[in-house]
Image: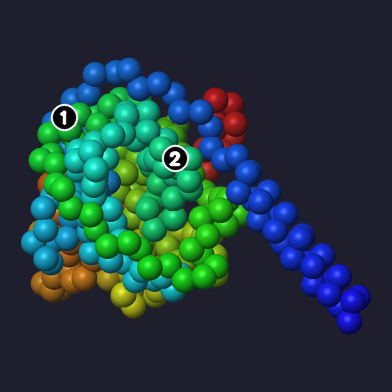
Amino acid sequence: MRGMLRSVLLVAALAGGGYAGLRAWPIGEAAARITLEGDARRGAYLARAAGCVACHTDTEAEGPALAGGAPLDTPFGSFVPPNITPDFEHGIGNWTPDDLARALRQGISPEGAPYYPAFPFEFYAGFSDQDIADLWAALATVPPVAETRAESDIGFPFNARSGLKLWRATSLQPSDPAPVLGRSQEWSRGRELVEGAAHCGACHTGRGLMGGLDAAAFGGNDDLPGGAAAPSIRPADLEEGGWTASALAYALETGITPSGDVFGGSMAEVVKQGTGFLDEADRRAIAAYLLDPAPLPDADQVAGLR
């Protein structure tokens, strides 16, 4: 009996020590100082492209802009997008531009806690200092809302944020849509949007058991929040569905598909609150990249020389 008790105590001690070590495990990097002057107009455009408005506004309940979005029901729990208006108590009014940079590019809160990947920060990793400054300037123009959204309801063991440090070590794939030598300016802009701000892969790429993105990018996802699904947006599948560059650009503006149908679910919201606000050149750039995403054959060699 004493031997069993010692074993139980030893396991508990090891588990406790492991948990303590996990909590103490440092993550991220020191945030660079954001000292640039922001352009609120450009920041508002980027906020639309990045889905900030679509996610952090509960349009079904006709809630105030950026005061918190509708819950996202996932196998790991229900995630509630928070209030990101400049309210000091309920929003992000007590943040600094450096806090915003660390949140967007590293997925770490001002207190040093890791964010869940329901917040697609891994796609924002390539945001420049100017992008951050512009977003900060745009957010400062939003009326503060003194409302707190309901807390996220996340099941055990995923409710332990320290466990996200393991996820970051094994599954985090920060996006880096660097230009590819030999490609057009339109294609490069499309890559920047698709792989970065617009984070198309967040919905149109499947995820593994721990929530990491599959290697099969853009191959479709049958397990979106709420039980919805997103189709494959690979070139062959798009072409088989009757999509052309002009049809895709038009759908990103209007939500109308080549068959005359309309987008539903979360994609309808993406168009209504996001891509519908983009200019024609950016919508065409997204279409150009999605229909031809592969870099030139020697792109890897070229990248290795940069």
Residue in the picture at 42% in, 42% down:
109
Residue 41 in sight in this render: yes
Task: Determine the residue located farthest toward the front in the rendered image.
Answer: 2
Left or right, residue 107 beside residue 36: right
Residue in the picture at 19% in, 41% down:
87
Query: Nearest the camera: 141 or 265?
Result: 141
User: Vertically, is 259 above or below 180?
Assistant: below
**Quadrant in which residue 205 is drawn:** bottom left
Query: Nearest the camera: 155 or 193?
Result: 155
Query: Nearest the camera: 164 or 144?
Result: 144
The tally of labels here is 2
Q: Which residue is mark 2?
A: 111
- The image position of residue 252, as x and y in percent, is 18, 56
* The N terminus - image quarter: bottom right
Q: Which mark is residue 213?
A: none
Query: Nearest the camera: 272 or 69?
Result: 69
* Tag 1: amino acid: Ala
Quote the CA–CA distance across marks 2 and 1: 26 Å
Q: Which residue is mark 1?
A: 40
- The image position of residue 168, as x and y in percent, is 56, 50
Residue in the picture at 52% in, 60% down:
160
Q: Secondary structure at mark 1?
A: helix
Task: Determine the residue located farthest toward the bottom in the rendered image.
Answer: 1
Q: Secondary structure at mark 2?
A: loop
State the colouring used for the structure image. Answer: rainbow
User: Vertically, is 35 above or below 273?
Assistant: above
Residue 251 in sight in this render: no
Left or right, residue 271 beside residue 102: left
